[in-house]
Image (spheres, helix red, strand yellow):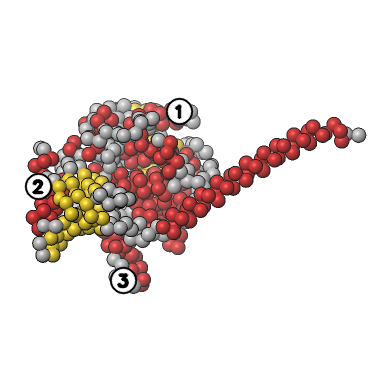
Amino acid sequence: MEFAELIKTPRVDGVVLHRPFQPVVEGTLCLTGHHLILSSRQDNTEELWLLHANIDAIEKRFVGSSGSIIVKCKDLRTIQLDIPGMEECLNIACSIEALSTLDSVSLMYPFFYRPMFEVIEDGWNSFLPEEAFKDLESMTDEWRLSEVNKDFSVCPSYPLLVTVPKDIDDDTLRKVATFRHGGRFPVLSYYHKKNGMVMMRSSQPLTGTNGRRCKEDEKLINATLRAGKRGYIIDTRTITVAQQAKARGGGFELESNYPQWRRIHKAIERHSVLQESLIKLVEACNDSSHSMDRWLSKLEASNWQSHVKEILTTACLAAQCIDREGASVLVHGTEGTDSTLLVTSLAQIILDPSCRTVRGFQALVEREWLQAGHPFQQRCAQSAHSNGKLRGEAPVFLLFLDCVWQILRQFPCSFQFSEAFLVLLFEHAYASQFGTFLGNCAADRAKLKLPQKTVSLWSWVRRPEELERLSNPLYEANSLVIWPSVAPQSLLLWEGVFLRWNRSSKWLDEAYEEMVHIIDYNKELQSKVNSLRRQLAQLETEDGPLQTP
């Protein structure tokens, strides 16, 4: 298919652009295969380059012979284009709708994008499982890297290499895969260096109504326990939902078959509920006509903050079992690709200081989201403005980033990166020139040959100037476990995402610049103090013999 077939009117003059916190601009609108571009001859006006993939929905309005197109973006921005001529307006709207909903992944912009920057480090090779396993080997010899999934046949949503207990052979893993939903048998998620406890993740067991049993599954998860120790199974579903799953062939681990494990049920909602919550939240944030009481009521009715609280509570529970109780943990929900990953990744933010560095956080996203099989292509196909029927879209990754922001806000000196890094990841998960978030799993990325045909987002992030932009000036390495508060008054609405196009950040930006200035000045003074101390010590050393009686 040629993009030209979808572009009915490639160029229109005299288009007026309205966008948040910027002056109105008149210029020429051009449509290309991947971008909507508006350029103006007016001085000091920034061109608009909007990826079609970033367009969530459009609305058309007509007054006389001209029309307006309201463009609602996946990054939650809304812009308006006033287009002279009814026919031109209809053609542009029709083309935008077609170009923003392309089904073929290989027609998306990352396959056409060529970087204008020097690639210092190839992001596709930066966080390979083999490298992570070397770190694990330096701490323990109880695990091995298995190639049982080398052709993606045992578990289509797992990567080629997975870390499993050393005493469990590949034949056992194949049998366990038939007992777990989607073949997602328990694999290592995190090893706690302090006490040797581990966190595993999987999907639900296929026990069904007959209470089906799998000895190999029991052997695999028991292999993670220390002698005389018990473990915890954290099921991210309520007991009612888990019971209902049995009727559909799913279920949960029966205590009679797993006597060394205690099962705890939590209540993280399914992806369809989370998507409805996001839609209500964004609707509330965009509605400026209400009184404060009404606005707060709508905010509460969205249940977004309740989801954040439940997710953080469950992650804290997993971290507590590992660090304070000295117990190993297995986390799963139904498929093991959504709520499970929320819990395992956030627990690592709490427990592991390296995950709070820029590189460590990239590795966490790569390991616990991309390689672990979170279906980004499906979940991020639409954002909060879609009018169509939902097909599995859900803001699961956005909820993860929101939870990280809540922890960062409570521990502002413990993270090497700033809020800007989290916003960047949110934007690129939904629409990007990079191939990192394309596909639903490692098998999809291998089939699409993304490492050969696209550029990795991590290649961009590793540039020194970008690292400087994303860094946190308050950072002081903290090797301790950090315990976030989940009290309602401690959890705030993430304004940097949900209100950034509704409320000017001018004062916050100025306050941030002032803070950076104070920190730099403090470092300068500290350097002078250290220099004077060295000079004083040197003078005392030289004068020492003269003062000796």
Q: Position of residue 421 (x, y in %)?
A: 39, 45
Where is 296 relative to 276, above or below? below
SS under mark 2: loop
Quadrant containing the C terminus in the rendered view: top right
The residue at which mark 3 appears reads as 290
Upstream in sequence: badge 1 or badge 2: 2
Which residue of the protein is positioned furthest toward the right in this rendering?
A: 549
Direction from residue 185 to residue 139 in the image, left or right? right
- Residue 331 at least partly seen: yes
Label 3 crowd (10 A; few <14 / some 14-19 / many >=20): few
- Residue 267 at least partly seen: no
Residue ID at (23%, 45%): 51
Direction from residue 336 to residue 355 in the image, left or right? right
Q: In the depicted view, which residue is nearer to us: 180 or 191?
A: 191
Number of the label disc, if any, that sits on residue 302: none
Q: Position of residue 347 (x, y in %)?
A: 43, 46
Where is 111 relative to 295, above or below? above
Q: Nearer the viewer, mark 3 or mark 1?
A: 3
The residue at which mark 1 appears reads as 137
Upstream in sequence: badge 3 or badge 2: 2
Label 1 crowd (10 A; few <14 / some 14-19 / many >=20): few
Mark 1 touching mark 2, by CB under 8 A? no
Direction from residue 269 to residue 14 in the image, left or right? left
Disc 3 from disc 2: Cα separation: 40 Å
SS under mark 3: loop
Q: Amino acid under label 1? A: Glu
Number of the label disc, if any, that sits on residue 8: 2
Disc 1 from disc 2: Cα separation: 59 Å
